[in-house]
């Protein structure tokens, strides 16, 4: 939305990344992306089947939230793949798993959960999200 000649708001995952990005900066960026997209994830995950097509405003908002969540998750995953430190990567993937569970995207969350190698981080994620237990 443009008010008073200001440019549109740019999401954190749409910002240009200045590579090379250190592991700490990458983990921080992933954390910020996941927290920023968390509200959209909760909206699409909290009300399954809520959009019935009767209210176009709700339908458009749901579509925007879905697109916003998907772009954020994709960008966060791309950044996480480039993190070289195992613990930092596992922690960052845990943040992405949290985002996916909040969006009720359990299939993606389980796939990402399997990539976490550190036992302590796996246990923390399982304690936060028991739905990931198989």
Image (tube, rainbow, N blue to C red):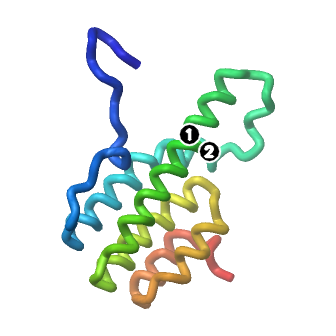
How would you rate the neighbour count of disc 2 (Cα within 10 Å): few for under 14, some for 14-19, many for 20 or more?
many
Residue 29 as seen in the image, left or right of residue 133? left
Residue 43 as seen in the image, left or right of residue 120? right
Depth check, front residue: 56 or 98: 56
Whether 115 is drawn above or below 109: the answer is below
Whether 97 is drawn above or below 70: the answer is below
How would you rate the neighbour count of disc 1 (Cα within 10 Å): few for under 14, some for 14-19, many for 20 or more?
many
Marks 2,1: beta carbons within 8 A: yes
Alpha carbon distance from label 2 to label 1: 7 Å
| Residue at figure coordinates x 31%, y 83% from the top left | 87
Residue to which mark 1 is pinned: 65
Dot 2 or dot 1, earlier in sequence? 2
Residue to which mark 2 is pinned: 44
Q: In which image quadrant can residue 21 be found?
A: bottom left
Per the image, label 2 sits on a secondary structure element best described as helix
| Residue at figure coordinates x 39%, y 73% from the top left | 81
| Residue at figure coordinates x 72%, y 46% from the top left | 48
Depth check, front residue: 71 or 55: 71
Q: Position of residue 114 (x, y in %)?
A: 55, 82
Whether 62 is drawn above or below 86: the answer is above
Residue placed furthest toward the top:
4
Depth check, front residue: 102 or 110: 110
Depth check, front residue: 18 or 100: 18
Q: In which image quadrant can residue 78 be found?
A: bottom left
Q: Position of residue 70 (x, y in %)?
A: 54, 51
Which mark, residue 134? none
| Residue at figure coordinates x 30%, y 22% from the top left | 7
Q: Position of residue 40 (x, y in %)?
A: 52, 43
Per the image, label 1 sits on a secondary structure element best described as helix
Q: Position of residue 105 (x, y in %)?
A: 63, 60
Q: How many marks?
A: 2
Whether 47 is drawn above or below 34: the answer is above
């Amino acid at each position: 939305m443009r008010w008073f000649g200001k440019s549109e708001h740019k999401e954190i995952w749409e910002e240009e990344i200045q590579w090379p990005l250190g592991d700490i900066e990458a983990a921080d960026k992933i954390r910020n992306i996941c927290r920023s997209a968390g509200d959209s994830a909760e909206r699409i995950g909290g009300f399954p089947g809520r959009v019935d097509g009767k209210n176009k405003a709700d339908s458009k908002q749901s579509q925007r939230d879905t697109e916003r969540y998907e772009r954020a998750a994709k960008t966060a995953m791309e950044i996480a793949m480039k993190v070289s430190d195992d613990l930092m990567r596992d922690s960052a993937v845990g943040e992405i798993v949290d985002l996916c569970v909040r969006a009720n995207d359990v299939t993606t969350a389980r796939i990402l959960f399997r990539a976490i190698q550190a036992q302590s981080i796996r246990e923390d994620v399982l304690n936060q999200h028991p739905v990931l237990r198989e």
